[in-house]
Every structure is written in C-alpha cells, then in structure tokens.
Amino acid sequence: MSPMNRSQVKIHKSQAKFQKMIFLIEYNRQKARIISLKSFDDSDRVKAQDCRLELELSLNAKGIEHEVVLLEAESEAAIRITHGRYFHDLSELIARFTQELRAA
C-alpha cells in the first residue's frame, strides 16, 4: 500500500469514529429562545427532514414566523459551541465575545 493510500485509510477510520446526530431546532427570533429541540440519529436523516418540513408547513399555516433549522453535529454540546446564538441570550454572547477579545 502506498503512503497516500495509508493516509486515506487513516482518514476513513477516523471519520468512522465520528457519530453524527441531527438536531431540529424551532427558534423564536423575537424572544431569542428555543421553542423546541429534537435530536435524530444520522440514520434517521429522512425522518428529520420530514419533521422539519412538517413543522415549517404547520408554522406557516398558523402565521407563526419562527426559524426552523436542521443542524448536524457530534453532540448537542457541539452545536451549543458552533451555534451559540440559539442557546445564549444577547448579553451572554456579548460577554463571551468580550472575553475572547481580551484573551486575544
């Protein structure tokens, strides 16, 4: 096996360790809070997509303007880091941003 093939195999093996999850979030922008959060195994991707569509259609029919998103990550903890705006209010986000600026 050539070195290039070995590195490709290593990448493939490390990706196999990463168990993806899918998160469906309904978010009220005006109140800056999560209305609902559901998690799905990666194997239930179609079910997650169907639930997102059903939720969006239901909200639209009721005239409710909430943000509906599907996010993919290893865990809820990971999306709390990468998509913190869904989980923290504005004052918390500003405090975190200020801390990061001071640390830089």
Image: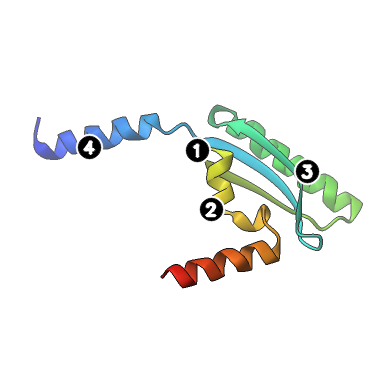
Mark 4 or mark 1, earlier in chain: 4
Where is residue 99? Give x, y as percent: 52, 67
Where is residue 52? Give x, y as percent: 71, 42
Q: Residues within 10 Å of mark 3 (few under 14, many from 20)?
A: some
Mark 2 or mark 4, earlier in chain: 4
In terms of secondary structure, where does tag 1 sit?
A: loop
In terms of secondary structure, where does tag 3 sit?
A: helix
Q: Residues within 10 Å of mark 2 (few under 14, many from 20)?
A: few
Query: Which one is in front in this view, the residue at disc 1 or the one at disc 3?
Result: 1
Badge 1 amino acid: Glu
Mark 3 or mark 4, earlier in chain: 4
Where is residue 54? Give x, y as percent: 77, 40
Q: Which residue does the numbered mark 2 point to in the structure image?
A: 82
Q: Which residue does the numbered mark 3 point to in the structure image?
A: 55
Q: Which mark is on residue 74?
A: 1
Badge 2 amino acid: Thr
Q: Which residue does the numbered mark 4 point to in the structure image?
A: 8
Query: Which one is in front in this view, the residue at disc 4 or the one at disc 1?
Result: 1
Mark 2 or mark 1, earlier in chain: 1
Q: Which mark is on residue 19?
A: none
- Do the residues bearing badges 2 and 3 touch, measured as CB atoms within 8 Å? no
Please say if 48 is above or below 92: above
Badge 3 amino acid: Leu
For the point 10% across and 38% down, which residue is it? 3
